[in-house]
Image (tube, grey):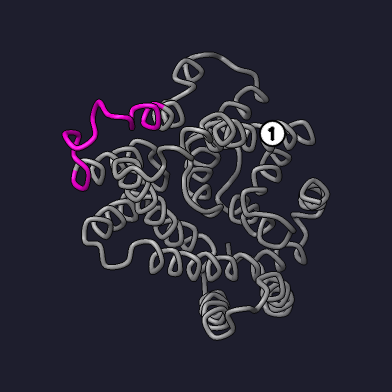
Amino acid sequence: MVVLIGMAYVVYGGLDWMQAVFYGVGACVIGIVAISAYKLTTKSIGKDKLLWAIYLVSAAVTVITESELIALFLAAGVVVWLVRAPPRKWFGGSSMPGLLAMSAQLAPATPIAASVDWSLLSQIAVFFAEAGAFVFGSGLAIVPFLYGGVVNEHHWLTERQFVDAVAVAMITPGPVVITTGFIGYLVAGFSGAVVAALATFLPCYFFTIIPAPYFKKHGKLPAIVAFVDGVTAAAIGTITGAVIVLGKRSIVDVPTILLALVTVALLWKFKKLPEPVIVAAAAVVGLLIYKGGTS
């Protein structure tokens, strides 16, 4: 379905009615991401001052750099680990296999790839493999990482196209991360969609299967729990920062401001309201009020 929508976007994306649809949906998506970031923050950060500090720093860095920094995630995990479970409490003990498994999951896998002159598909494979391997948190956590690479680094898509890609992920069945397939299609057609999707999902699959026995045995150790808490706080901060980064591209006038606010209000009031229903309504509103030239 993502590929079919991608084909329609490529063929009809320049038409006023298609622009109108994404005009409404883009603003709605910002509202959805905002309420999701709020829920994640309240559930995972709580009243922990250290996690709040990491959360705020991560959000600020995302807004300033308009990208997701993997090093910040790792640093956040290490800081919480050192504060909550210093090495003297566990180092050299039975936790080592679990920590080695964690290190294997987090160690950069493609430092050489950046210096090689890959073809376009190889570039897509490397970039989305990094996204699948090193992005932590909910499906929304991948959005700022993709923005930094797809728009700022590789210049594969414009800011408007990227926001539209996120919107497509919101209106199609499946997790938000399937936006990678849509982006791959826009960059390199059907083969790009296949490579992007496989590269995104295969790393997390293998990193789940291989370390699983170690996590099952050692996953409740204080050091590992602390590390994961730190990474989670940084990931949620990044999602929150992404709301501001993407909002600057989608919230462009009074109607889009109202669409985003109404979306937040509806999701706040009606907890079980399906998001696709809101997105569909936003698309209709976009068709009704879009005047062109707003982006």
Residue at (74, 59) in percent of width and height? 172
Residue 267 vertical position relative to residue 213 in the rendered view, above or below: below
Q: Tell me where the magenta segment starts and ends, as one range.
A: 83-100
- 10 Å neighbourhood of mark 1: few (<14), some, or many (≥20)? some
Q: Which residue is mark 1?
A: 198
The question of residue 183 being in magenta is answered with: no
Question: At which x and y percent is residue 215?
Answer: 46, 38
Residue 93 on the magenta span: yes
**Direction from residue 65 to residue 267 in the image, left or right:** right
Corner quadrant of residue 244? bottom left
**Which amino acid lies under the numbered mark 1 shown in the image of this protein?**
Leu
Q: Is residue 67 above or below residue 95?
A: below
Q: Is residue 228 above or below residue 289?
A: above
Q: Residue at x 71, y 41 (%)?
A: 186
Residue 1 place in picture, x, y as percent? 81, 51
Q: Observer-nearest residue: 92 or 191?
A: 92
Q: Residue at x 48, y 43 (%)?
A: 145
Q: Nearer the viewer, residue 62 or 219?
A: 219
Q: Going 58% across and 79% down the picture, which residue do you hit?
A: 271
